[in-house]
């Protein structure tokens, strides 16, 4: 069946993306509207609507995502730090209903967020 979800289409290669890393489970690609000098997204290839849908079953998947983020940030020279964000639902500011982790780096990020 053809995916209807935007990030499922990117994961399937039906919509192009500027990819940094890909394996059987996950894909990392640059955000189309970057909010920092480094801004990429990491998604599971499997469709999960948001972090609100995660269970203990996804423990290894999440560990893998964070390990790949750490490696990519090291390779990109983000030694001053970075931020990982996953927005959930309307109040969280989620606009694409497929779990994704924003990785922002190479500028000083404000806290608390807006
Ligand atoms: P959210 O608002 O759901 O937390 O994050 C969705 C992110 O996906 C946004 O930062 C937005 O710029 C990015 N985005 C939306 N459509 C596309 C696309 O087609 N390609 C890429 N690379 N990023 C996208
Ligand atoms: Zn999806």
Image (cartoon, helix red, strand yellow):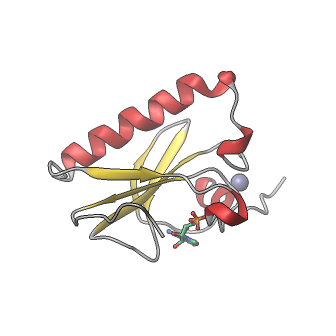
- Measuring from the top left, give residue 109's x and y in whole percent: 30, 64
- Measuring from the top left, give residue 60's x and y in whole percent: 54, 23
Q: Residue at x 68, y 22 (%)?
A: 57
Numbered marks: total: 0
- Measuring from the top left, give residue 43's x and y in whole percent: 55, 49
* Vertical position of residue 83 compared to residue 15: above or below: above
Q: Residue at x 48, y 70 (%)?
A: 114
Foreground pick, 107 / 13? 107
Q: Residue at x 74, y 40 (%)?
A: 53
Furthest toward the right, the residue is 1
Ligand 1 position by quadrant: bottom right
- Measuring from the top left, give residue 45's x and y in whole percent: 62, 44
Left-right relation of 33 to 47: left
Q: Quadrant of residue 97?
A: bottom right
* Vertical position of residue 76 compared to residue 15: above or below: above
Foreground pick, 64 / 52? 52
Left-right relation of 32 to 91: left
Left-right relation of 33 to 36: right
Furthest toward the front, the residue is 112
Left-right relation of 38 to 31: left
* Vertical position of residue 68 compared to residue 36: above or below: above
Furthest toward the bottom, the residue is 33
Q: Residue at x 84, y 52 (%)?
A: 1
Q: Quadrant of residue 37?
A: bottom left
């Amino acid at each position: 069946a053809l995916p209807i979800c935007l990030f499922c289409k990117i994961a399937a290669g039906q919509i192009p993306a500027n990819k940094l890393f890909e394996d059987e489970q996950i894909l990392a690609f640059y955000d189309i509207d970057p909010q920092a000098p480094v801004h990429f997204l990491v998604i599971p290839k499997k469709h999960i609507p948001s972090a609100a849908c995660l269970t203990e079953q996804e423990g290894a998947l999440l560990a893998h995502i964070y390990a790949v983020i750490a490696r990519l940030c090291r390779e990109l020279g983000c030694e001053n730090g970075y931020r990982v964000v996953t927005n959930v639902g309307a109040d969280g500011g989620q606009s694409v209903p497929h779990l994704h982790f924003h990785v922002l780096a190479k500028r000083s990020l404000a806290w608390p967020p807006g």
